[in-house]
Image (tube, rainbow, N blue to C red):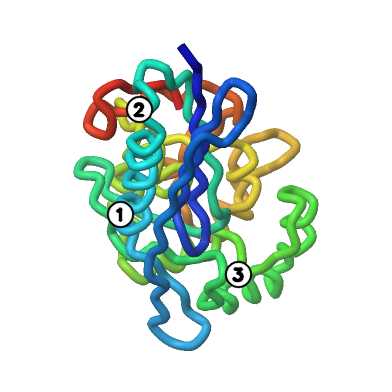
Amino acid sequence: MHTYVIALDQGTTSSRAVLFDENARIVAMKSYEFEQIYPQPGWVEYDPTAILNTQIDALREVVRISGAPLDSIAAIGMTNQRETTLLWDRKTGRPLHNAIVWQCRRTAPIVARLCEEGLEEHIRQTTGLVPDAYFSGSKLSWLLDHLDLHDRAERGEICFGTVDSFLAWNLVSGRPHVTDATNASRTMLFNIHTLEWDNELLKMLDIPRSMLTAVRWSSDDYGSVSNEIMTYGPPI
């Protein structure tokens, strides 16, 4: 019997799944596009459920069209658009706002304030990034202020995540709240030298540590796909 692996590619305009055989040959591929939302000039959002549903549909369809038995799938890997920022309720899993996309410029004033307060060099040295609204940290700060969620976040009721975290929460059995170091490094909140969330940046952006993910290696086993998604759950 052949052994297969699946790659999930959650991108800026579509969610894709690709099934490979043991010789790295593509056996089947499927993608679904989703809507881009522009509330006003310079702002870009997605419906989080559209991200999730198109990725699940692509996963299920690539298995169906390939005819691969579920128990022949050895593992599922995932890659994703970076910096896009989501919040959801830790108890219900319900998204609390549209995802704010990496392209969105609404938080440029927040980044300008950080630089005016003398944090530009700290950001560069700690995160390896040039301060910019492109990254997740200022987007998360804006969401907490805009939705008045600071108290709930402090109580641990709110989850923050980039797209990988949101997908892992919804696809993996046990709902792990995780990311990998490469995604964490694109938030402008992560110390790339200590591999930990940076206390000074969290303080300056008023972001509670309790809402942040655990950070793991890209090659880690994050758990098995939930039986709600696939009747047999390979590791992801």
**Which badge, 3 or 1, comes first in the chain's sequence?**
3
Q: Is residue 11 above or below residue 219?
A: below
Residue tagged by mark 3? 133
| Tally of numbered tags | 3
Q: Amino acid at mark 2?
A: Val
Is residue 116 found left or right of 229 in the rendered image? right
Instruction: Using the image, tell me which numbered label, if any, was put on residue 225.
Output: 2
Residue 173 appears at what percent x and percent y?
A: 31, 26
Q: Amino acid at mark 1?
A: Asp
SS at mark 3 in the image = loop
Residue 155 appears at what percent x and percent y?
A: 30, 44
Q: Is residue 162 visible?
A: no
Disc 2 versus disc 1: distance between alpha carbons? Answer: 32 Å
Q: Amino acid at mark 3?
A: Ala
Disc 2 versus disc 3: distance between alpha carbons? Answer: 33 Å
Q: Is residue 105 visible?
A: yes
Residue 87 appears at what percent x and percent y?
A: 36, 54
Residue tagged by mark 1? 151
Q: Nearer the viewer, mark 3 or mark 1?
A: 3
Residue at the location (41% across, 49% down)?
Answer: 160
**Which badge, 2 or 3, comes first in the chain's sequence?**
3
